[in-house]
Structure formats: structure tokens, C-alpha cells
Image (cartoon, coloured by chain):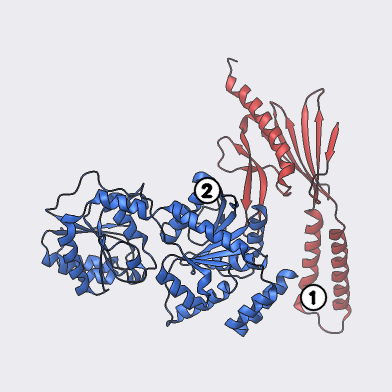
Amino acid sequence: MGDKQSGVHAKYDYIHDQESSPSPLDAHHVEVRRSGAKPVAACFFAALVSAYAFFAFYSKEKPNILAVWGIPLGALLMMKLCWRTVKKESVLIMPTFGVQLETHYRSGRIIRRFVPMGKILKPVLQECVTPVTCYWCLSLLLRDEEQLMLVFKEIRSPLKMLIPIWKALCAAADEGGGLEECGPDG
Amino acid sequence: MADWRRHRILMVSDFFYPNFGGVESHIYYLSQCLLELGHKVVVMTHAYANRSGVRYMTGGLKVYYIPWKPFLMQNTLPTFYGTLPIIRNILIREKISLVHGHQAFSTLCHEALMHARTMGYKVVFTDHSLYGFADIGSIHMNKVLQFTLADVSQAICVSHTSKENTVLRSSLPPAKVFVIPNAVDTAMFTPAPERLKSDEIVIVVISRLVYRKGADLLVEVIPEVCRLFPQVRFIVGGDGPKRVRLEEMREKHSLQDRVEMLGAVPHARVRSVLISGHIFLNSSLTEAFCIAILEAASCGLLTVSTRVGGVPEVLPDDMVVLAEPDPVDMVRAIKKAIALLPRIDPQEMHARMKKLYDWRDVARRTEIVYDRALKCSNQNLLDRLSRLQLISKKCLTWYNSIIKMKRF
């Protein structure tokens, strides 16, 4: 059963899937809305690089260093553009078991990270400040770890989308933490 | 009461906690009192070491430590356009209604005021220091100040002397400049519970040991006072490049048992050092206000100070003995202060300071300045440019380019 919410942000869609049987899995997805600008820019850039390469190759003058290095650099940049474009990021909460964090790229690549429930001390919402901007991010405070773990590595979704995910993680962590405190004697 | 408006203020300066100083404590105490009055206050400063990001202080005071490294004397590198994205981001997300910049020497303050004015916000500027007119550094600083204050809504100075200095340097209309003195936390700076014995007189000096704070005067004054008054002892707290000179003076005149050098004193320990003395000595060569003598008076010490800048406006005549910044006159003033000591009641002095200086009063007066600033008419671009044209054609050309870039 999926509950699609497009939120107030023009860039992202928030989807909440909650299955009740056979095992309860709480899935939260934040999808990047496909914009027309990036593929058009990529095609235009590819055409520019190809035209320049063709001109440099068939020109009577000796090709300069810029022409020689510009082509592979341009190709590398295009590959990075396509390879690193994020399609969606997901948080799959398996109560009492753990949380799986997934990053799906448009190239088809998926990066998964699993965090056992007992390892999570607290999910926190915090403000990150960079030299040019400030944004909200959702992180996990882990036991015996100094560094926070970012839930969404690539996407900077708005606070309104992060709040329900944070609440779900808190509820799952409290439940998992309660069972953890019981110990071997129950 | 019916006209009360809740302001959302952004305080901007390169100088804030964890540094301690006049500007830093002014921003902190003023922010706390404004929060008490019901306003929202956010502080923006640069990152200090690993203190970066958003922090919350007492009373819910939100502080943005922007990860811009300071490059000279705790100042952020001036980039003009570089801080625009983060300043705009903070102004919008915190729903700021007014920007309050502190200290003429802060590049972050100047940039924030410029960008805020371009975005249509009202801005208030507080100047905490006196500057000269003759040397190259002051000439440059004054030009920058003229540019920034060309269209500031209101300005605040910490003394009448400072107001005169700021108006002359920045060509601001005097009607736009308010005088609101600093204050002191009298709850923190209280006298010793028991009065000190008078068989030995202790003179306390707490300041940065730099040229501007008159450390060279101390080198001349201390040996002479020790020679004239065998019962006098000195406690010198603070650190800086001139500390070596004081150590040499101590060695030269064999005053190791009469001059105690404490080194840098954490702000939390200042009161405990002050209450171990009878007289507080301030030898600054320039001061717009001097919070240090307020702290000393609040602890019940009689103050001896140089008559510079705004110092004569700070304390009543019976709490301070003033002298010219000259060793002979300072020794005379210390002699007069020693004679006045039996008449000084520390508890009574503290009680008077409580009535004279209060940060809540400073906050109420600053609130009036904010109300006045928000009532100022919106200047359009032509009015602002015409004011800038008075400063310099070059500034005008350059400012035009900033406006074009922001609109693009």
C-alpha cells in the first residue's frame, strides 16, 4: 500500500509504503523529480565537445593542448553527470531488526547500507551549515561511533519530508532500544 | 505597550563567543535581554576552530558559526559576493526583520549590512571603537565605513565621544546616531564579602598587554609607584606582545615580590582577581567606552584611568581618578587615589553601579532604535546611489556592478 505525497517542494516526491504482512516493513522513499534541463544540457554539451573534437581533428593547424585534453575531460564530465545522478533514496525500517538505507542512481547502480537497530542510539534532525547555504538533514546517532551517519547522502530534501521519516525512525529505535535493554534474562 | 512589535533580529559580527571582549559580551548580553523582552535573536559569526554550524546558547539564542576561516585578526576574508548566498539563506529561513551589525572592523558585518540593504532589509550598526584619521589603516577603514553606512537605517555608538568620532569618519547625519552606553553584569561582578585590609594596597591591572592598551605606560608607572609607596603591590593580569617589556621591568627593578604577573585570565576568573585589589588601573591610549572599569567599579574598586576617548563619560567623579596618558600624571593620580581609599565603600559603590548600568536598560533603548529603524522610509535605488556618489565615483561604479550581479 503506497501513499504518495508530492509535498511542497518542486524537486522531490515523498512516497511512504507500509506493509503489514507477512513482516511489517516501513519504507520511505524520496524520489528526485526528473527535470528536463539536465538531459538537454548534457546533450548540448556532448554536441559541443563532439563538434570541437571534429574541428580540432580535421583542422589544418596543429591541435593545441586544450583540444587534446579537452575531449577526454569533457567525456569524463558527461559520464560523471550521468553516473552520479540520483534517482531516489530510500529508508526501509524493519522493526527490531534494523534500518536499510538505499541510494538509487539513474545508471541503475544501487548503494545499500544496513544499520542494526541496536546500533542506533537516536535519529536526529540537524541543521548543516556550509559556506554558501544551510539545510536540514536527518542523521543517525550510533552507539560507540563518533561520527553521525547521514540517512540521505545525496539528496537535500526539505524539512517537511524529513519529519515523518524521523518520527518513524524514532519509534522504531525506541522499540528496538526497549527490547535491547531487556537483556538475556528478558 | 500597544505599539510593541516583536522583532526578529540578526546580529552579525566577526567577534563573538568563544572569544571574550567588549564587543563579544555586548552582543551576548544584549541578545539575552532582547530575548527576555520577547524578541527573536539570531547571531551570525564565523567558525572558531572546530566550532562550526548551528549552536544554541542560554535562553535559546541561536548562533550560526559560518565555516569561513578568519584570515586576519579574527576577521573573515572580504569577498563582497562570497557571503551573499549564506546571508540570504539565513535572512529568509529565520524570517529576519532587521539586521544589526557590530564593530567597524568586522568584514562580515560590512558585507551582511550591504547585502541586507540590497535585499530591502532595515539595518542598524553599532560602532564599538574609536579610529584615527591620519594613518593609512584608518583612512582605508573610514572609506569602507562611509560606503557601508551610506544607507544604514540607524546607528548606535557607545559614548558621545564615539558618536562624534563615527559621525566625522562616516559622514553620517548626527540625527541618525543614537548613544547607548554599554553596561555590566552586576550579578556576576560583586565586591568581596569582607573588606580588604588597608595595611597593604593592591593595584590591579587586567587588560591585553598591547600598545593600544597603554602597556608601555605601565612599564614607566609601576617602578615609580613602587618607589614612592612601599606598601603598594601590583597584580597584572593579561597577555600580549608587551608582556615581555613588563617582565623585563620587573627584573630590572627587582620587583618580583611586588609585581605579580598572572598571564591570561579567563573571563570567569576576572572577578576573583579584581576583588583581591583596592584600586583598578587602566592605562589605555584609546577607548570608546571601557567595560573593564565598569566591572572594577561593580566589584567595589576605585579606578585610576587615562582620560582618553569615552572614559570620562563612564563613571561618576567620586568613583574614578583621571589622568593624562603620561607617566608623571598617572603617578599623581595613583597618589590621589591612595589618599581617597579610606572613603571608599565597595558595597555602596556596587549598589550605585546596579542603578546606573543595566543590560535590560540597554536592550530597551536598543528596542527604540529598532522601532525607529523599521519606521524609516524605504529608499529606492536612486536615492542610495546618490548617497554613494557623494563618497566616491569608484565606489559608485563598483556598487553598480554588485546590484547588477544580484539582479541577474
Is residue B38 left or right of B205 when viewed as pictured? right
Q: On residue B256, which mark appears?
A: none
Q: Secondary structure at mark 1?
A: helix
Kindly identify the residue that appears in the image at 56 percent across and 68 percent down. Answer: B110
Residue B275 visible somewhere in the drawing: no
Kindly identify the residue that appears in the image at 57 percent across and 72 percent down. Answer: B148
Measured from the top left, where is residue B101 in percent x and y? 54, 63
For this orientation, the residue located farthest to the front is B2
The relative height of residue A67 versus residue A162 in the rendered view (above or below) is below
Give the labeled residue for mark 2: B37
Local crowd at mark 2 within 10 Å, few (<14), some, or many (≥20)?
Answer: some
Label 1–label 2 contact, CB within 8 A? no
The answer to which image quadrant residue B288 occupies is bottom left
Give the labeled residue for mark 1: A67
Q: Which chain is red?
A: A
Local crowd at mark 1 within 10 Å, few (<14), some, or many (≥20)?
Answer: some
Is residue A108 left or right of A141 when viewed as pictured? right
Residue flagged by tag 1: what amino acid is it? Ala
